[in-house]
Amino acid sequence: MKKSFWLTLFAACGLLANSFAQNTSSGPDTNTLLWRVSGKNLSKPTYIFGTMHMICASDIELSDSLKKAIRNSDNVYLELDMDNMWEMFGAMMNMNMKGDTTLSDLLSPEDYKKVKDFFKEHSTMVPFAFMEKFKPMLVGSLIMEQAAPCDNMVVMEKLVMDEANKNNVDIKGLETFKYQLGIFDKIPYKLQAQQLVKMVDDADSGKGNEVNDIKILTDAYRNQELAKLDELTKEDPTIGGFADILLYDRNANWVKKLQQLMPGNSLVIAVGAGHLPGKKGVLNLLREAGYKVEPVKNEMIKKKGKEI
């Protein structure tokens, strides 16, 4: 099953909600989204948790293991400080393409009309007059959200934030909105626009199967199968050309930052699941830096009466 570029990003990153392979065999001990980092110069453990940006509320609940880690942490780090309203407000200034570029500059008149008509028929909270200036990847994410398989979608980072706030744990970000949105400036706008047109074509013709694809990805995520998520992601040839920009460079930057943040602190790091596994993933990079990285049992659906 070939995944669309947009669906891969939706399931992967923090803004769109990443999956690259794990070098361990699957099983009850390794199928987990929660990992403990210890050893080297750490007096307290840090926990790494893989998120999926948006998921049906009925499909997810934070595990007792993760809640305990948050409760005992000094800080929670997300990809972005989503608790900072000023930071989020500033992000609006970085959603537009550079140089006053609009979709009409990137597409033929026919394709531009096709996209415009699509959003007339499928209204969103954002008027098209604003949207046509957005980086096309962001426009594509709006279409993906319309393909959501349920009416009670939740942002997983919001669940983590709520738990941190309940326990008076400060929330911080590994990146800024400006930096993360700037990543999309490194991928040619024209390519993004072409992918957007293809997505509209598929939706209009009924060839698109985003709802079923989201279900498959959600099932893999809910089962905590990082290797399966990687397999699905690798089917998309487009993302492979930009893996360094979207994943690997950021992973390396985060690990450098974590090596400065972790000593003397117990942290919970909640980032897109695809940043975790693989040779260039956060988990392996931490191992290469000399830390002990272990899987933690992570029952995502809470069992009644069961406590840690």
Image (cartoon, rainbow, N blue to C red):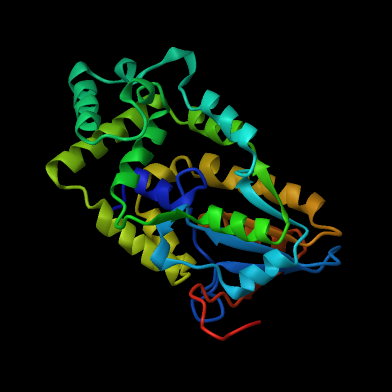
Tell me which corner region of the image, top left, top right, bottom left or bottom right, holds residue 204: top left
Q: Could you tell me residue 207's position as x and y percent?
A: 16, 47
Tell me which corner region of the image, top left, top right, bottom left or bottom right, holds residue 173: top right
- Depicted 281 relative to depicted 192: above or below: below
- Depicted 214 relative to depicted 142: above or below: below
Please tell me which residue is depicted at 43% across the width and 68% down the height of the picture: 222
Q: Which residue is more in the foreground, 7 or 61?
A: 61
Left or right placement of residue 265 versus residue 295 in this view: right
Residue at far front of view: 166
Image label count:
0
Please tell me which residue is depicted at 70% across the width and 62% down the height of the picture: 167
Looking at the rendered image, the quarter that the N terminus falls into is: bottom left
Can residue 281 be seen here? The reply is no
- Depicted 199 relative to depicted 182: above or below: below
Please tell me which residue is depicted at 24% across the width and 25% down the height of the picture: 116
Q: Could you tell me residue 242's position as x and y percent?
A: 47, 40
Please tell me which residue is depicted at 31% across the width and 62% down the height of the picture: 215
Looking at the rendered image, the quarter that the C terminus falls into is: bottom right
Q: Could you tell me residue 19's position as x and y percent?
A: 47, 56
Residue at far left of view: 205
Left or right placement of residue 66 versus residue 104 in this view: right
